[in-house]
Structure formats: structure tokens, C-alpha cells
């Protein structure tokens, strides 16, 4: 992008110079032609010299105009290149804005979900006896944020260890509202299936 901009400004300068080069030689040709036209020059040698100068100025003008056209073509190509790059940049910036908007929407959605989960949790927590809640809170603090774990297939979902058959029998015999805990990690075990075995 910087390179493309520099190329364009360099070529614009080169074009200005080519234009003024042509103008300069053309002006000189006009002056030389005027001297011829005014008829003040009478010496044949001098007339010949002026005509010779006109011829050589015409050649020079031709060369300079050719160079001018070449610079113009290069400038046109560089401007096209710059325009394409600017459009691409604009497109990428637009895509970025779109991505940022969907990210912000997703974040807002997460905030809403979080708020709902907190509200649901608070509602459940309010129904749990204070001493059980205190135990749960203490376990959660000491056990990497997980104070209660599901007991499934004879295994504690917190520490992933299998409970021994005697413990499982004890749990099976316990009342539904008895608070059962894992012998290994101490977490509260949540019974979601009949712990037979
Ligand atoms: Zn455990």
C-alpha cells in the first residue's frame, strides 16, 4: 500500500516534469519560428541555422512527448493498482467490522446466558439447607471449583475414581435426601441413577 502510494506520487512528479520539459522546448520553438516569420534575419546562413534549429527542436519535442506518454501510461497503471489495493483494504476493513459485530453479538448472548444461569443457580441455592450449602461452598473452594459430582456407573464424576462395592451398597441403602460423599475426594455425590452393584 505504502509502496503503491509512493509509486503514484513519484510518477505524478515525473509527469509534471515531462509536461514542463515539453512546454519549455515548445516555447523555444515558438520563439525561433517568430524570428523566422518576422523576417528580421536576412543572412542565408543564419536562416539556415534557424531552420535547422526548428527541425532539431521538432525532433526533441517528439522525443519528449513520447517520454511524456510513457510516464502517463505508467501513472495510469500505478493509479489502477493503488485503487485496487484501496478497494481491497476497504473490503477487508468491512469484513473486519462484520466479524467484530458478530463477536460483540456473541459476547452479548453469553452475558445473557450467564445472567440466566446465575439467576437459575440463585433460585436453586435458596432452596438448599444452609449447612449443606456451606459444605458445598467449602468443597467447591477446595476442590478446583467443583463441590458436587455425579455418581455414574459406580464412579465419582469429580475425581473419576470407582467407589468400592461396600460404599456403593451403603449409598444404595441410604435415603434419597441423605448427603452422600465420595470417600476419595470428599465431594458431594449426586445420584442420578440407581447405584446398584
Ligand atoms: Zn471423588
Image (cartoon, rainbow, N blue to C red):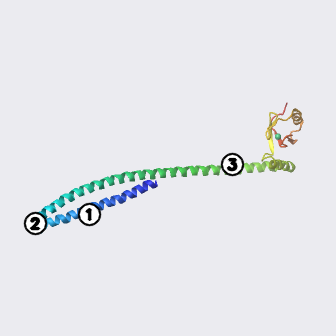
- Distance from Cα at disc 3 to Cα at disc 1: 76 Å
Percent of width and height locating residue 69: 30, 54
Disc 2 on helix, strand or loop? loop
Percent of width and height locating residue 156: 81, 38
Specify the label residue 138 is tagged with: none
Q: Which residue is mark 3?
A: 113
Mark closer to the chain start, 1 or 2: 1
* Name of the residue lying farthest toward the top: 197
Of 153 and 88, the residue lying toward us:
88
Of 159 and 34, the residue lying toward us:
34
* Name of the residue lying farthest toward the bottom: 40
Residue at x 28%, y 61% (from the top left corner): 21
Mark closer to the chain start, 3 or 1: 1
Numbered marks: total: 3
Write down which quadrant ligand 1 falls in. Answer: top right
- Distance from Cα at disc 2 to Cα at disc 3: 102 Å
Q: Is 92 placed left or right of 165 in the picture? A: left
Of 196 and 17, the residue lying toward us:
17
Q: Which residue is mark 2?
A: 43
Q: Which residue is mark 1?
A: 24
Amino acid at each position: 500500500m505504502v509502496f503503491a502510494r509512493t509509486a503514484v506520487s513519484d510518477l505524478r512528479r515525473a509527469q509534471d516534469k515531462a509536461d514542463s520539459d515539453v512546454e519549455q522546448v515548445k516555447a523555444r520553438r515558438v520563439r525561433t519560428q517568430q524570428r523566422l516569420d518576422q523576417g528580421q534575419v536576412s543572412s542565408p546562413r543564419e536562416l539556415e541555422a534557424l531552420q535547422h534549429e526548428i527541425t532539431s527542436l521538432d525532433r526533441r519535442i517528439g522525443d519528449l512527448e513520447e517520454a511524456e506518454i510513457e510516464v502517463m501510461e505508467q501513472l495510469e497503471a500505478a493509479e489502477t493498482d493503488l485503487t485496487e489495493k484501496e478497494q481491497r483494504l476497504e473490503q477487508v476493513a468491512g469484513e473486519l467490522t462484520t466479524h467484530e459485530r458478530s463477536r460483540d453479538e456473541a459476547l452479548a448472548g453469553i452475558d445473557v446466558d450467564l445472567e440466566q444461569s446465575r439467576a437459575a443457580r440463585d433460585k436453586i441455592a435458596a432452596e438448599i439447607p444452609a449447612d449443606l450449602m456451606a459444605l458445598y461452598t467449602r468443597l467447591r473452594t477446595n476442590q478446583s471449583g467443583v463441590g458436587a459430582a455425579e455418581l455414574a456407573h459406580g464412579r465419582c464424576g469429580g475425581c473419576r475414581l470407582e467407589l468400592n462395592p461396600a460404599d456403593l451398597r451403603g449409598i444404595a441403602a441410604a435415603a434419597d435426601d441423605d448427603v452422600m460423599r465420595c470417600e476419595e475426594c470428599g465431594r458431594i455425590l449426586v445420584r442420578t441413577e440407581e447405584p446398584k452393584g
